Amino acid sequence: MEDLLWYKNAVFYEIYVRAFADGNGDGKGDFAGLTSKLDYLVALGVDCLWIMPMYPSPLLDDGYDISDYTHIHPDYGSMQDFKTFLTAAHDRGLKVIVDLVLNHTSDQHPWFQAARRDAKSPYRDYYVWSDTDRKYSEARIIFVDIEKSNWSWDDAAGEYYWHRFYASQPDLNYDNPSVQEEMRNVVKFWLDLGIDGFRADAVPYLFEREGTNCENLPETHAYLKRLRHFIDIYYPGRILLCEANQWPEDVRPYFGEGDEFHMGFHFPIMPRIFMALRRGDRSPLVWITGRTPPIPESCQWCTFLRNHDELTLEMVTPEERQWMWQEYAPEPRMRLNLGIRRRLAPLLDNDRRKIELANSHLFTLPGSPVIYYGDEIGMGDNVWLRDRDGVRTPMQWEASPGAGFSSVDPGQFYLPLIDAKPYGPEKVNVVGQLSDEGSFLNTIRRMIAVHKQNAALGWGDFGWVEAGDPAVAAYCRGCGEGERILVVNNLSGKPIQMPLSGLGARRLVDLFDSTLEIETEKEPVLVLEPYAYRWLRLV
Ligand code: NOJ
């Protein structure tokens, strides 16, 4: 029988098609290239691919500015290439979700072009217009480094239009029932093609209301619930994943009573993994898990360490943000908007112990983990590139000058390969790590495998375990009867002895190596090396 709750203990992998593999030798990744790499992803062990926007677009926001919702960007191939990819993924047991950008289109979308040219066009009301730029003044600006207002003047229209992101991304007007229906048809179009769901972009901002901050409005939830209802009726088992960069209590309503989103990113826990690691203190994690409300049984959080955006610091206090910038983005060009535009390995000083430890949290805290392409091999970044390009560079498959990304001369790649030592392809690449049993890539493969073998890591509840030292993040998953897993993370650079007496007389079996056992009666203390982690089954 089909498992409708497959996402509860799945591992996700985020792919930027342009960056992954070039099948036609034009220096840009495409679906043919991606299809040729599916066996790698199967061997890695991930369950579901999240494909960043692959639609026609001027690419001023790398595809989050869509000019046509029902075709494939010509750089990425044809619709047939997409279908071939989808079938090949499904044949291998992989699920595929794609980005769904509801909130805005590109200003190049024919709807916007018609709207701005003709006040009487039915498309005029597809967008949000005003003769003043003073409305909705309580709405914050998201891309603060570039945009000074959420309103931009359009000469052709003779009015201002509303946009929560770049001025080239006008917001759709969800008060217009036609817009609601158009977007439902987009959802239908891709589900009919067979995709397994959507990562729904920027959902808090669908509606605007004066006197509010225009985020998380009741009207927005009502529309999203109708969308979910439509999916439940016609496409059971397909999922909606919510991108709402909000505090947990504000994300909670997006799960509804299990009748809105299946999944939601847990934004605030992410910077706190980095905080805890740098401070050698679990308190930030204790604080945020304590502030995270329970969610319906059929729902699931998505955890992540990095993604295609800057490491967002919206869900921290101003003091914490300054501290994070000081610690993790000492050079101004490492910062972007309210975040840090760096990849995982350079953030953690390319220290294998710290990178594994961060991943230990990713794979064991409540939620389904999402891996960002390239982070499984410890790729580097390039802070000299514009916007978020520095974390979107070509995937490094092998040690050759083109890194196996494309057959064309690297000078013609859509972005330069990472070449700064020690992150260049000659050192950091898939082929080299696959053949090395002790490589980071093979460690991630084992983490994925263990995560999937242990239902408690997907389904189990969560509770902190007293470790006698704040530098130890120790917690229990599946704390009820049945399978129980104890996770222990030493956040500090010092060795720690964790007393096990609180557990009673137990046998603890290491999940990575079942020959490693601890009898708490004989060994009442767990010795943790600096930055060490253990995942243990309680017997
Ligand atoms: C969130 C996406 O992750 C980001 O890349 C994009 O720029 C904005 N939404 C606007 O769509």
Image (tube, grey):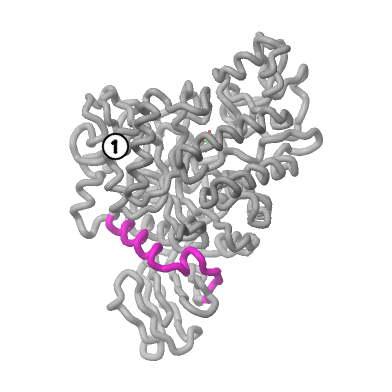
**Count of marks overlaid on the render:** 1
Occupied quadrant, residue 173: top right
Amino acid identity at mark 1: Ala
Determine whether the beta carbon of the residue marked 1 sits less than 8 angstroms from the nearest atom of ligand 1.
no
Residue 314: x and y in percent read 60, 44
Query: On the image, numbered disc 1 is attached to which residue?
Result: 420
Q: Position of residue 44 (x, y in %)?
A: 31, 53
Q: Main secondary structure of the magenta part?
A: helix
Left or right: 510 as drawn, with respect to 275: left
Q: Is residue 131 magenta?
A: no
The residue segment tinted magenta is 442-466
Question: Residue 163 or 105: which is nearer the viewer?
Answer: 105
**Label 1 element class:** loop
| Residue 305 relative to residue 400: left or right | right
**Quarter, ligand 1:** top right
Query: 489 or 197, which lies in front?
Result: 197
Against 125, is 245 above or below? below
Q: Nearer the viewer, residue 184 or 399?
A: 184
Where in the figure is residue 210, as x and y percent of width and height?
A: 80, 33
